[in-house]
Each structure stands twice: as C-alpha cells, then as structure tokens.
Image: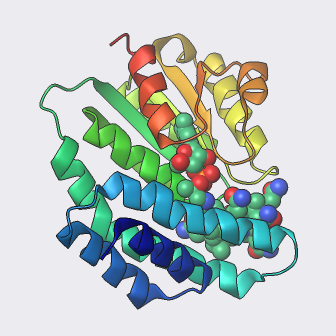
Amino acid sequence: MEKDKLLEQMRTAVIEGEIEEGEALARRALEEGIDPLECIEDGFVAGINKVGALYEEGDMFLPELVAAGEVMKEALAVLEPELLKSKQTRTILGRVIIGSVAHDIHDIGKDIVASMLTASGFEVHNLGIDIPADTFVAKVRELQPDILGMSALLTTTMPEQQNVIEILKEEGLRKGVRVMVGGAPVNREWAEAIGADGFAEDAVEAVKVAKTLVGS
Ligand code: B12
C-alpha cells in the first residue's frame, strides 16, 4: 500500500481509538519497509496531536483520550524495537536518566525520547511515570548520569522540574549532571527560567540537544 495512505490510516486509528487496527498498521508498515520513525512522527504522533486539539476544543472527551493513548502504546510497542535495531550504534555517548515528574502519568512522548536516545547510542535509564523529586535525586546520586531528562505534560506538574533542580543544588549534585526538560507545555523560556541546561520540542531535537550536552 502507498505510504501516505498508511500514515493517514495510522492517524485515523489513533483518533478513532482503534487499538488492533493501529497495531496491524504498524506491522504492515514495517513489512513494507517504511521507516519506523516516520510512522511514529507522521502517523501516530500526528494522530494524537489531533486528538489533543479536539479534546481542547471540547469535541472529544476523556474516554476517547484514554483510547487514543492506548492505540499509541500498542503501536509504539511494535515500532520501537525496530527503531532500536535500525539505528543502534556501539559506542555509548553518555548515560541518561529520564522520567515523568511527580503527579504526571503521561509517558508516550517521554518514552519516544528515551527510545530515540537509546537508538542514538545513549545508555538510558527510564524511571517511568509519577517520579517523586527524591527518587530523581537518589538516582542521580546512584547512577551519576551525564544527563537527567524530565518530562511534564501538565502545567500543574511543570514546577516539579524546577523542584528537582533546586534539590539537586541543595544536595551538591547539580554541577555533575546536565538537566534537560521537555513536554507539551514546556518551552525554552521555562527551561531557562528554572536553570535547566537543555530543552527540546520533540524527540529528534532531544537527541541533538543531548549530544551537544555531552559534547559529541
Ligand atoms: C494522551 C494524553 C493523555 C493520556 C496519557 C497516556 C499516556 N500513557 O501517556 C491520558 C488519557 C492518561 C491522559 C490523562 C490526563 N490528561 Co492528558 N493528554 C494526552 C494528550 C492528548 C497527548 C499527549 C501525548 O502523548 N502527546 C504525543 C507525544 C509524542 O507528545 P509529547 O508528550 O508532547 O512529547 C514530545 C515532546 O513534548 C518532547 N518531550 C516529551 N517529554 C520530554 C522530555 C524531555 C527530557 C525532552 C527533552 C523532550 C520531551 O518530545 C516528545 C516526542 O516528540 C495531551 C494533548 C497535548 N496537546 O499534549 C493531553 C493533555 C496533556 N492532558 C491533559 C489533561 C488535563 C489530562 C488529565 C488531567 C485529564 C483528566 N481530567 O484526568 C489527565 C492527567 C493525568 C496525570 N495525572 O498525569 C491536558 C493538560 C492541560 C494542561 N495545561 O495542563 C492536555 C494538554 C489536553 C488538553 N488540551 O487539555 N492524557
């Protein structure tokens, strides 16, 4: 099938909350040799962005948002292993800890960033969702990563990124780690205001920023 048609169907599967269809489309695209990153960005992510817009306008409600999230998860489970296979490099560029901040359970974007970083040669420790500040700090102490990445999708959870940075300072750990922040409501101004070292709009930019932060 034509690539554009498949990508269009992926967007529709997310919008309509069709989990099995999304998974089947992801498999089909791989069989046809379509780049998994293109499926993620131009297919599934484009679909969930549309869902976000519809939800904002009041044309879609929470159960549909949940269903769209499920479609994303299942499709990514098919695509991400391929992403890792196709891009894997052997040299480790640096160690990254990443997680969604306290009270935030959004993880689709954070997981894409984690996969892309892994695929690009970083050693990634993905802590998961709703990670308390103390856990981030304890993990930084334990694993001594080059980069700490924090994702926040809610305006109410963004301050947690700042909170973690402040605790890192208090504990004398801030100088040893570069902090990168992201998530839909996060922007460059916010990143600068809270004293983060890097911000990225999407996963592709996140890899570029991470490489710059480790000096490669
Ligand atoms: C799917 C979704 C959900 C799913 C999440 C499923 C999951 N497993 O993640 C479910 C249904 C569970 C959900 C729940 C809620 N959600 Co919600 N959700 C969304 C939605 C539609 C899409 C998010 C998404 O996955 N986008 C696709 C990914 C690929 O994009 P992304 O997350 O932005 O990530 C990219 C970049 O931001 C960046 N990035 C992300 N993280 C990081 C980290 C680093 C370090 C870097 C460098 C870059 C980076 O790279 C990523 C890849 O390109 C958004 C709408 C939107 N516009 O974002 C609302 C949205 C975020 N949700 C919203 C709300 C209100 C909620 C709820 C409070 C709803 C409710 N009443 O219960 C709950 C909150 C639960 C909680 N405590 O966290 C609001 C937030 C509003 C606000 N201003 O705070 C939004 C904006 C919808 C809206 N327009 O109102 N949600």
Residue drawn at (45%, 45%) of the image: 113
Q: Which residue is more in the foreground, 99 or 83?
A: 83
Q: Which residue is more in the foreground, 18 or 122?
A: 18
The vertical placement of 126 against 105, above or below, is above
Residue 88 drawn at (x, y percent): 18, 40
The vertical placement of 204 against 47, above or below, is above
Residue 94 drawn at (x, y percent): 30, 24
Q: Which of the four quarters of the rendered structure image does ligand 1 lie in?
A: bottom right
Looking at the rendered structure, the number of numbered marks drawn on it comes to 0
The vertical placement of 107 against 116, above or below, is below
Note whether residue 51 is visible.
Answer: yes
Residue drawn at (15%, 25%) of the image: 91
Residue drawn at (62%, 39%) of the image: 182
* Quarter of the image with the N terminus in it: bottom left
Relative placement, left or right, of 153 versus 98 is right
Residue at the left extreme, as displayed: 90
